[in-house]
Amino acid sequence: MTTSFQAENRIPLNTSRLRDLRKSGRLPGIVFGKNTENEMIHIPTIQFQKWLKQGTSGFIELQFEEKGSLTVLLEDLQRDPVTRDLLHVDFQQVQTNEILRTKIPVKFNGTPIGTKQGGVVQVQLSSIEVEALPRHLPTSIEFDISAMDLGETLHVSDATFAPDVTVISEGNESLLSVVKP
């Protein structure tokens, strides 16, 4: 699923001007990519926050009035350490014919059996780093963790991807564990 945001180019701004931009409901950001110039932009904050709450995965279309649209992926976002308000967002431009390295979000479904025995679910990783052509990238990876017992761990190697997707994350990295408190 592709989400669309109205984006505008921006000039370099000092701290107080960036603060004013955020107060006006716009989130500053940057678009970078291979063989392209970095572009400073801003997008609507509230619309972006709604998208974040839905799961933050998939391609994003940045619509520009003057030059059409760009297809991007969310690469990083910065929040205020105290208020948790969004401060800045980084997007990676997608080249449809080039291999792209990105992080795929991991979603866990169900309640492990081990929690009924007093166990606690610990999430160690919320994404898996992969490489693939954009058309082969999944929007997320889902795991049913309802059968996990006390002491069991889910690893990156337990994820299954299409043959066109190369996993960059180490296979022995833990995604989630059910442990004694």
Image (spheres, grey):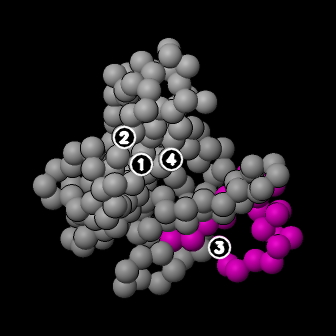
State which tag comes first along the sequence, 1 or 4. Answer: 4
Name the mark on residue 154.
2
Which secondary structure lies at badge 2?
strand
Relative horizontal placement of residue 33, taking residue 5 as reference (left or right): left
Which secondary structure lies at badge 1?
strand
Q: Which residues are magenta?
A: 8-31
Whether residues under marks 4 and 3 lie with C-beta atoms below 8 angstroms apart, the answer is no
Return the residue found at the far top.
116
State which tag comes first along the sequence, 2 or 3. Answer: 3
User: In the image, what residue type sits under mark 4?
Assistant: Gln
Q: Nearer the viewer, residue 165 or 14?
A: 165
Disc 3 marks which residue?
A: 10
Disc 4 marks which residue?
A: 124
* Residue 20 belongs to magenta span: yes
* Residue 15 belongs to magenta span: yes
Q: Look at the image and tell me whether residue 42 can be seen.
A: no
Residues at marks 1 and 3, CA–CA distance in whole angstroms = 41 Å
Give neighbour class at mark 1: few <14, some 14-19, many 20+ (Cα, 10 Å).
Answer: some
Residues at marks 4 and 3, CA–CA distance in whole angstroms = 37 Å
Residues at marks 2 and 1, CA–CA distance in whole angstroms = 6 Å
State which tag comes first along the sequence, 2 or 4. Answer: 4
Residues at marks 2 and 4, CA–CA distance in whole angstroms = 10 Å
Image coords of residue 85 (percent x, y): 75, 50
User: In the image, what residue type sits under mark 3?
Assistant: Arg
User: In the image, what residue type sits under mark 1?
Assistant: Ser
Image coords of residue 65 (percent x, y): 51, 63
Mark 4 or 3, closer to the camera = 4
Disc 1 marks which residue?
A: 174
